[in-house]
């Protein structure tokens, strides 16, 4: 019997796995990648009896590979908050999936573990821009943490996950997971490994300053559309800049378009005051997906930008 852990390389995926492996250590093979690498189960081969844990990637986008693993005799524990489509019924599949806009994979794992590593759930929720959920979980901790520091850590871990390839990132997600794993309490990580936070914070600040100078293609009461260039810094900042815009202008939807050779990489944020519909909009496009509050399109042809803008207006016009 072998163990395989498959997880999104963003804050939610990493913090979900931290909770599980701090409570139940396993000598697992780690399968992860940049946040946008959502077809991670394609990379997994398993044998009968292997235990496969899947965290924070869409079941709908990994359906065929999931069925392949089950047919091979794998036992799959699947936790996620993205649109799943029809969830297979199989004796070797345990699925914990909730698409509520206020739920993250880290929060689902926290509930499963009855708050045993709630601090990391707080970090994961902050990284996914679910501040209210993070604060609700933080209220269950016996000693109140410094929420500002945990939020900063969540945002930095999430920022680190964005890029076209792992080479764009400051830390490979599996490396970052292993670096954080020894710290049962994320506050200890901030105290005992300050270089990690300092490295990410400096890079984040530099990238965000560049994003602030990027052209606004459209900006009104309903929607803003920002274009970033084809550059590593732009790919790194695309998602967290979308979160920043959502927090700064909570009544607008936001689309951050990053130039890539084939068109645009798109991050969409629903209005913070109406966390619905982002996934529905993005699933109208071939490489789109996500969740109700935050979604994306991995490759949007340039000629389809106007179609995306029209779809967002239909979704969010008041």
Image (cartoon, rainbow, N blue to C red):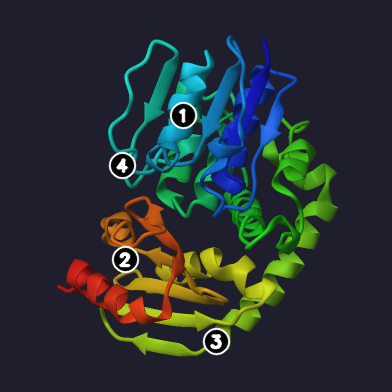
Mark 3 lies on residue: 214
Q: How far apart are labels 2 and 3 at the CA level?
A: 21 Å
Q: Earlier in the sequence, mark 2 or mark 1?
A: 1
- Residue 197 seen in the figure: yes
Q: How far apart are labels 4 and 2 at the CA level?
A: 15 Å
Residue 216 drawn at (x, y percent): 44, 88
Horizontal arrangement in the rendering, residue 257 relative to residue 91 (left or right): right
Mark 1 lies on residue: 66
Q: How far apart are labels 1 and 3 at the CA level?
A: 40 Å
Residue 240 drawn at (x, y percent): 54, 64
Give the residue drawn at x 46%, y 29%.
66
Residue 107 drawn at (x, y percent): 46, 35
The answer to whether marks 2 and 3 mark residues whose Cβ atoms lie closer than 8 Å is no
Mark 4 lies on residue: 100
Q: Is residue 8 above or below residue 249?
A: above
Mark 2 lies on residue: 271
Q: Is residue 185 above or below residue 214?
A: above
Q: Secondary structure at mark 1?
A: helix
Give the residue drawn at x 59%, y 47%.
11
Image quarter hosting the N terminus = top right
Q: Is residue 289 above or below residue 29?
A: below
Which of discs 1 and 3 lies nearer the camera? The answer is 1
Query: Closest to the observer: 233 or 134?
Result: 233
């Amino acid at each position: 019997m072998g163990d395989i852990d498959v997880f999104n390389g963003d804050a939610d995926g990493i913090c979900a796995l931290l909770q599980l492996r701090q409570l139940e250590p396993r000598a697992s093979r780690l399968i992860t990648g940049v946040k946008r690498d959502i077809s991670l189960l394609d990379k997994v081969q398993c044998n009968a009896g292997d235990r496969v844990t899947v965290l924070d990637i869409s079941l709908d986008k990994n359906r065929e590979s999931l069925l392949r693993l089950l047919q091979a005799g794998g036992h799959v524990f699947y936790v996620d908050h993205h649109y799943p489509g029809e969830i297979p019924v199989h004796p070797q599949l345990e699925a914990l999936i909730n698409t509520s806009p206020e739920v993250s994979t880290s929060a689902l794992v926290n509930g499963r573990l009855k708050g045993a590593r709630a601090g990391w759930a707080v970090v994961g929720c902050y990284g996914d821009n679910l501040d209210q959920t993070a604060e609700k979980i933080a209220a269950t901790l016996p000693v109140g943490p410094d929420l500002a520091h945990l939020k900063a850590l969540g945002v930095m871990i999430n920022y680190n996950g964005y890029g076209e390839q792992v080479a764009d990132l400051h830390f490979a997600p599996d490396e970052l997971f292993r670096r954080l794993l020894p710290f049962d309490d994320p506050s200890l990580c901030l105290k005992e490994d300050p270089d990690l936070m300092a490295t990410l914070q400096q890079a984040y600040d530099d990238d965000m300053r560049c994003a602030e100078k990027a052209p606004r293609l459209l900006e009104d009461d309903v929607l803003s559309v920002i274009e970033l260039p084809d550059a590593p810094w732009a790919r790194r900042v695309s998602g967290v800049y979308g979160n920043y815009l959502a927090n700064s202008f909570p009544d607008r939807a936001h689309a951050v378009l990053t130039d890539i050779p084939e068109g645009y990489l798109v991050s969409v944020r629903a209005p913070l005051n109406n966390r619905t519909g982002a996934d529905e909009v993005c699933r109208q496009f071939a490489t789109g997906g996500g969740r109700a509050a935050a979604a994306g399109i991995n490759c949007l042809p340039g000629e389809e930008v106007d179609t995306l803008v029209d779809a967002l207006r239909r979704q969010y016009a008041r």
